[in-house]
């Protein structure tokens, strides 16, 4: 093996510091430089190792602390979740209890409201009774007066017959007076009968809640008759434009209650001392009937429209207004007649209520 082969063999064996003689300065400098670089690299590696170990220890400490904190947080979270579940259970129980109380209170309130509404209906019916009684005074008074006058005349005629002083002219005059008195009696009795019939229809319809087929114009006319006294005292004129022949299969008592409340609302809130005018019209719209009620009273400001049908809302609190009249109208229109009622009004321009209901109540 020659010298060059020995040299490479030494390098392959790891003898990087292997030198041959004679020593070559260039080779020596090269090896010294390599060893210096290796030493520097080893020192840098050692430095990095120390730094890395320090960083690992630091990160390990941080991770240990984090793991400990995480464990504590897990415990806190578990405790929080347990408390939350307990709170949710209690809240659910409270909600169920509250729902039960609300349902009970709502039922009690509905019963109380129904009683108030029924009382209002009876009060309205009582007003109708008073009006009819006042209306009956005139025909009954005429009947009593004519019957008394007729009795007196017949007594005088009987006396002349007994005394023999009866003359033909006296007989004819007495007969004429009796015929006239009889005609007045018949007309007064018929008027009283009409009033009683109207009241009976209204009273039976409003108290029995019975359903029947009826003519709309006749039913509205009946309620106008029963409210005649109140309308005359308030100087209210009613223009009934409903055409005959509009038949409905519904609850006339509730419809009469609606018109009674609308009319009394106009009298109490719409008209002043000078009275006013009411127009009632209707038309058939296929399976529905549209009824229009108008007055030329004070009107209602647009911002108050949404309050009109609310219970206990009244501008006459303490002056005889209960605040339930229009609430009853709304409930009857929607709940019983299965229809809808809309208000159109402005201050100083009267009111228009449009009631749309099925011709045959479902």
Image (cartoon, grey):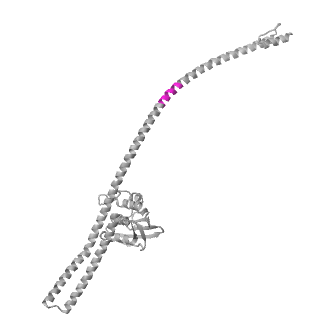
Where is 224 relative to 159, above or below? above
- Residue projecting furthest to the right: 2
The quadrant of the picture occupied by the N terminus is top right
Is 195 on the left or on the right of 54, as rendered?
Answer: left
Is 33 on the left or on the right of 153, as rendered?
Answer: right
- Residue projecting furthest to the bottom: 168
Q: Position of residue 207 (x, y in %)?
A: 33, 64
Is 4 on the left or on the right of 334, as rendered?
Answer: right
As rendered, which of 184 and 33 lies closer to the eye? 184
Q: Residue at x 13, y 88 (%)?
A: 162
As rendered, which of 234 and 88 lies closer to the eye? 88
The quadrant of the picture occupied by the C terminus is bottom left
Where is 161 relative to 13, above or below? below
Q: Can residue 321 be seen in this view?
A: no
Q: Which residue is drawn at 38% across and 46% down?
A: 100
Region rendered in magenta: 66-77
Q: Residue at x 31, y 64 (%)?
A: 124
Q: Where is residue 25 in the image (x, y as percent from the top left)?
A: 80, 10
Q: Is residue 191 visible?
A: yes
- Judge whether residue 74 is colored magenta: yes
Where is 273 relative to 316, above or below? below
Q: Where is residue 241 in the image (x, y as percent from the top left)?
A: 41, 73
- Residue projecting furthest to the top: 21
Q: Where is residue 2 in the image (x, y as percent from the top left)?
A: 86, 10
- Judge whether residue 316 is colored magenta: no
Write down the quadrant of residue 165 in the picture: bottom left
Where is 110 relative to 268, above or below? above
Which secondary structure class fits the magenta region best? helix
């Amino acid at each position: 093996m020659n010298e060059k082969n020995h040299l490479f063999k030494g390098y392959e064996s790891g003898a990087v510091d292997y030198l041959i003689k004679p020593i070559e300065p260039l080779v020596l400098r090269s090896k010294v430089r390599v060893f210096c670089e290796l030493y520097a690299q080893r020192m840098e590696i050692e430095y990095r190792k120390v730094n890395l170990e320090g960083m690992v220890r630091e990160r390990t400490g941080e991770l240990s602390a984090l793991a400990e904190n995480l464990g504590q947080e897990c415990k806190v979270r578990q405790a929080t979740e347990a408390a939350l579940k307990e709170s949710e259970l209690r809240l659910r129980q409270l909600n169920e209890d509250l729902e039960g109380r609300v349902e009970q209170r709502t039922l009690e309130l509905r019963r109380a409201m129904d009683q108030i509404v029924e009382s209002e209906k009876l009060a309205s019916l009582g007003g109708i009774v008073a009006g009819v009684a006042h209306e009956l005074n005139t025909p009954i008074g005429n009947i009593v007066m004519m019957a008394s006058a007729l009795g007196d005349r017949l007594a005088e005629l009987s006396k002349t017959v007994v005394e023999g002083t009866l003359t033909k002219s006296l007989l004819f005059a007495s007969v004429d007076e009796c015929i006239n008195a009889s005609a007045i009696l018949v007309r007064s009795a018929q008027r009283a009968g009409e009033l009683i019939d109207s009241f009976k229809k209204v009273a039976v319809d409003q108290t029995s809640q019975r359903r029947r087929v009826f003519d709309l114009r006749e039913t509205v006319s009946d309620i106008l008759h029963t409210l005649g006294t109140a309308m005359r005292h308030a100087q209210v004129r009613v223009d009934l434009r409903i055409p005959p022949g509009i038949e409905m299969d519904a609850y006339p008592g509730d419809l009469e209650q609606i018109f009674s409340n609308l009319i009394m609302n106009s009298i109490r809130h719409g008209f002043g001392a000078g009275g006013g005018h009411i127009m009632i019209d209707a038309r058939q719209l296929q399976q529905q009937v549209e009824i229009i009620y108008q007055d030329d009273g004070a009107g209602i400001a647009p911002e108050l429209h949404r309050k009109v049908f609310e219970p206990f809302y009244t501008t006459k609190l303490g002056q005889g207004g209960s605040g339930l009249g229009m609430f009853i109208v709304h409930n009857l229109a929607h709940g019983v007649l299965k229809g809808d009622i809309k208000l159109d009004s402005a201050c100083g321009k009267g009111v228009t209520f449009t009631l749309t209901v099925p011709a045959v109540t479902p």
